[in-house]
């Protein structure tokens, strides 16, 4: 017999299984590795180091922009179709395939003859798979717990996912991720299975590792999670689109939901960009290696796990809105730090030559990004549950994904533009993100603390 507790644990395992795409690929290993390879490629074409680093960051930004547009266009339509047929698990199976194939193929980004376009294509396919699978797993939330426990379930799920990300990152750093200088891993080992450090095969193994991790740890999800199934309904694209259009038109009379979607549209875009460009920033501005960025990721993920769990408790006790507000204040402060820091100085105050202070400051930033980012996402997910019902949850979360991706191109786009114009990674990242967080905070004032429940 599959108990409610086992169903919740199975649902949490999706966060555990999918988190490495964010931790290993988007932020701490593949993203910085892509930046290294792209920077070397552009320098070989005649650009200086700073110009090449900026060009690499811009390329990464354009690639994520394209994926974001696709997700934004299709997410609400797929959600409406799933709710119209009453079936969600089949979509999770489908997009899990995208996740696995896209991540596995990142192995082929070699440093000697890099095909940057193909790498971004496969990365985008895997990212689309993760985002769409997340929509359908999130839509199962209303059937897992009552409102009084929803914040705890959401926050604990994010915390559990962060723990999975930490463990996968530790495995990657200890056994696979070689230093570009020594060819050894963090504990001084050569990469296993005869992987060639000269071709960065240890680091490139992050793609297959992410795929295998997902396949193994989705087993509890598919074994224990059951969707609430009513009578089977015939598929009707016309009916699904009519329902979606009705939901969109209803936003005129649902001020809190509309404000939540608009607010989260901006602050989640900023948060995702902060995740996506943090490693690239550390590589280009501070000169960190992939291994050092990975240690930074472990610190941030530990903080994320702890504070997602604590934030879930605060969410259940006081509602998600104050948690969201506090998290955004912290993230704006982090962006202000990034805006004023380089390897040489902090807002004009020079560091001593060879000082470790810039590294220490950025480690603190990592702790704060992990703490605030995890709680922000978990409480935003809870707030969305407070604005929907079990029957229309996939459609609503599809719309929620649209709100997160409709402007998902804005952060990478503005970062790419600002970086290209200024030639500065610091300005290119910080100013657009601060602006997006501030817009999100202003719009949040029209969101009811408990959505449409009270």
Image (tube, rainbow, N blue to C red):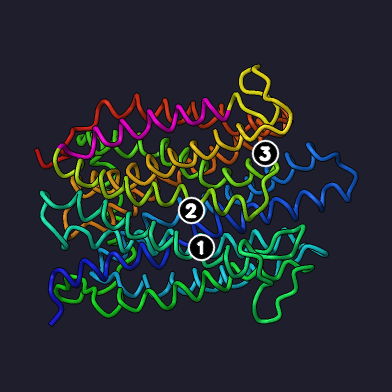
Earlier-in-chain disc, 2 versus 3: 3
Earlier-in-chain disc, 1 versus 3: 1
Q: Can you identify the residue that label 1 sits on?
A: 170
What's drawn in magenta, residue-wise? 318-338
Q: Is residue 453 magenta?
A: no
Query: In the figure, residue 145 lies in which quadrant?
Result: bottom left
Residue sitting at x 20%, y 42%: 315
Residue projecting furthest to the top? 348
- Do the numbered discs 1 and 2 sit on residues whose CB atoms are within 8 Å? yes
Q: Nearer the viewer, residue 369 or 130?
A: 369
Q: Can you identify the residue that label 3 sits on?
A: 286
SS at badge 3:
loop
Instruction: Give how far apart the Cα atoms at labels 1 and 3 are.
Output: 22 Å
Instruction: Give how far apart the Cα atoms at labels 1 and 2 are.
Output: 7 Å
Can you say which quadrant of the picture contains the C terminus?
Answer: top left
Residue 196 x/y as whole percent: 75, 74
Query: In the figure, residue 356 lies in which quadrant?
Result: top right
Q: Is residue 420 left or right of residue 22?
A: right
Q: Can you identify the residue that label 2 sits on?
A: 298
Q: Nearer the viewer, residue 43 or 173?
A: 173
Q: Nearer the viewer, residue 312 or 359?
A: 359
């Amino acid at each position: 017999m599959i108990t409610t507790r086992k169903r919740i644990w199975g649902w949490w395992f999706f966060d555990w299984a999918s988190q490495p795409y964010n931790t290993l690929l988007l932020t701490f290993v593949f993203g910085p590795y892509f930046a290294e390879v792209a920077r070397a490629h552009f320098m070989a074409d005649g650009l200086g180091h700073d110009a090449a680093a900026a060009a690499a960051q811009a390329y990464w930004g354009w690639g994520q922009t394209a994926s974001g547009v696709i997700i934004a266009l299709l997410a609400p339509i797929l959600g409406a179709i799933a709710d119209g047929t009453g079936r969600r698990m089949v979509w999770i199976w489908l997009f899990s395939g995208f996740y696995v194939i896209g991540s596995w193929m990142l192995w082929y980004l070699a440093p000697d003859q890099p095909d940057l376009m193909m790498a971004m294509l496969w990365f985008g396919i895997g990212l689309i798979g993760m985002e769409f699978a997340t929509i359908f797993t999130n839509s199962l939330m209303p059937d897992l717990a009552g409102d009084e426990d929803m914040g705890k379930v959401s926050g604990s799920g994010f915390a559990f996912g962060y723990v999975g990300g930490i463990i996968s990152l530790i495995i990657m750093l200890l056994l696979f991720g070689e230093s570009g200088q020594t060819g050894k891993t963090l504990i001084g080992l050569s990469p296993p299975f005869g992987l060639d450090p000269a071709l960065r095969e240890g680091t490139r193994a992050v793609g297959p590792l992410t795929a295998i991790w997902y396949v193994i740890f989705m087993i509890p999800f598919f074994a224990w999670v059951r969707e609430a199934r009513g009578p089977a309904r015939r598929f009707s694209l016309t009916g699904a689109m009519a329902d979606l259009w009705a939901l969109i038109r209803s936003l005129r009379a649902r001020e809190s939901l509309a404000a939540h979607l608009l607010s989260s549209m901006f602050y989640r875009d900023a948060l995702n960009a902060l995740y996506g460009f943090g490693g690239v920033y550390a590589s280009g501005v501070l000169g960190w290696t992939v291994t050092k960025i990975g240690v930074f990721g472990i610190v941030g993920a530990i903080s994320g796990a702890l504070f997602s769990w604590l934030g879930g408790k605060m969410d259940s006790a006081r509602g998600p809105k104050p948690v969201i507000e506090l998290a955004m204040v912290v993230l704006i402060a982090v962006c202000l730090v990034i805006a004023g820091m380089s390897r040489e100085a902090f807002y004009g105050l020079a560091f001593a030559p060879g000082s470790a202070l810039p590294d220490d400051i950025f480690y603190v930033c990592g702790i704060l990004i992990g703490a605030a980012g995890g709680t922000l996402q978990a409480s935003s997910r809870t707030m969305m549950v407070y604005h929907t019902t079990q029957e229309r949850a996939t459609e609503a979360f599809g719309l929620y994904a649209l709100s997160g991706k409709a402007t998902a191109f804005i952060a990478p786009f503005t970062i790419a533009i600002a970086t290209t114009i200024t030639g500065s990674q610091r300005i290119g990242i910080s100013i657009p993100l601060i602006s997006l967080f501030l817009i999100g905070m202003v719009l949040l004032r029209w969101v009811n603390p408990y959505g449409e429940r009270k």
